[in-house]
Image (cartoon, rainbow, N blue to C red):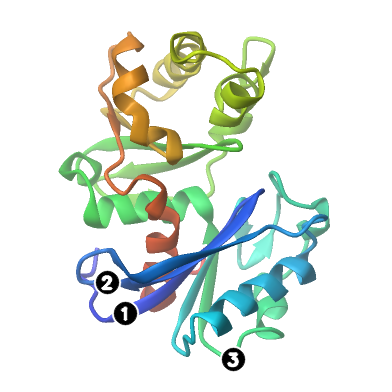
Amino acid sequence: MTTLSGHSFGIDIGGSGIKGAEVDLATGEFVGERLKIATPQPSTPHEVAKVVAQIVQEKQWDGPVGITLPSVVRNQEVETAANISKDWIGVNATELFADYLDADFAVLNDADAAGLAEVAYGEDIAKQGSVIFLTLGTGIGSAFFLDGQLFPNTELGHLTVGDDEAEKIASSAVKDREELKYKQWTKRLNKVLAEYEKLFNPQAFLIGGGISRKFEKWGPHLDIETPVMPAQLRNRAGIVGAAMAAVDGLKP
């Protein structure tokens, strides 16, 4: 991966919030405060794009912008919509955001962006061998890496485990909604990770998303053979990876 420098701007679009910040690409750290605005409901393309433009304007940023979506984005066309309006499906992301941003920009999958940030600024293990990066939040996002190179647009959260989709079993949103204790929730997560382990045999799992901050509360309850580690960038990773993509020309 190319060593990046200078500053860029990342925006991470989620089902509940849209977050943006300026990023120092030499360190992967935010420059100033992150700005978060609630995701409009319904979260249709134009309403979300308006919020993206608002964040860029409020932060007085006039350089490149990276944008993540909880979607498969291929050839800049949005092919899926997880936890955002189904109106996104079939939208050309380049055409949409060009109407709202007067800057160079890139659009990519949110978990892919977060994984790229971890490879660049996080654990060395993310750069070596086969690694599955997972974000546990409203759903379960995934990114596959082989020696630090991304295989884009994987959707492990939608893999059926038992009788249901993985993210309906073990996302952190499910934990909150069903008021599960960490040990109860980890039993579910272990079932999901065991299925991923059986199918893909990675050398390690990296877990991101807000719940990774509490890894010490649930990590010890996991009992799969594959090492499981909390991501170092926690829930900063999506914004940082988006900012990287904006200057690295990554457009899946």
Instruction: Looking at this view, name the residue that lies furthest to the left.
Output: 124
Q: Is residue 116 visible?
A: yes
| 30 or 93, nearer to the observer | 30
| Residue 94 versus residue 173 in the image, above or below | below
Q: Give the mark nearest the N terminus, 3 or 1.
A: 1
Q: Secondary structure at mark 2?
A: loop
| Residue 77 versus residue 146 in the image, above or below | below
Identify residue type, mark 1: His
Q: Which residue is mark 2?
A: 25
Q: Position of residue 18 (x, y in %)?
A: 59, 60
Q: Position of residue 242 (x, y in %)?
A: 44, 65
| Residue 243 versus residue 118 in the image, above or below | below
Residue 144 falls in which quadrant of the image?
Answer: top left
Q: Which residue is mark 1?
A: 7
Q: Give neighbour class at mark 1: few <14, some 14-19, many 20+ (Cα, 10 Å).
A: many
- The reply to whether the C-beta atoms of the residues labelled 1 and 2 are less than 8 Å apart is yes
Q: Give the mark nearest the N terminus, 2 or 3.
A: 2
Q: Give neighbour class at mark 3: few <14, some 14-19, many 20+ (Cα, 10 Å).
A: few
Identify residue type, mark 2: Leu
Q: Secondary structure at mark 3?
A: loop
Q: Position of residue 102 (x, y in %)?
A: 59, 91
| 206 or 39, nearer to the observer | 39
Rendered residue at 57%/38% (across/down): 155
Rendered residue at 51%/15% (across/down): 185
Rendered residue at 37%/62% (across/down): 240
| 214 or 202, nearer to the observer | 214
3D distance between C-alphas at marks 3 and 1? 17 Å
Q: Which residue is mark 3?
A: 102
Q: Position of residue 198 (x, y in %)?
A: 42, 15
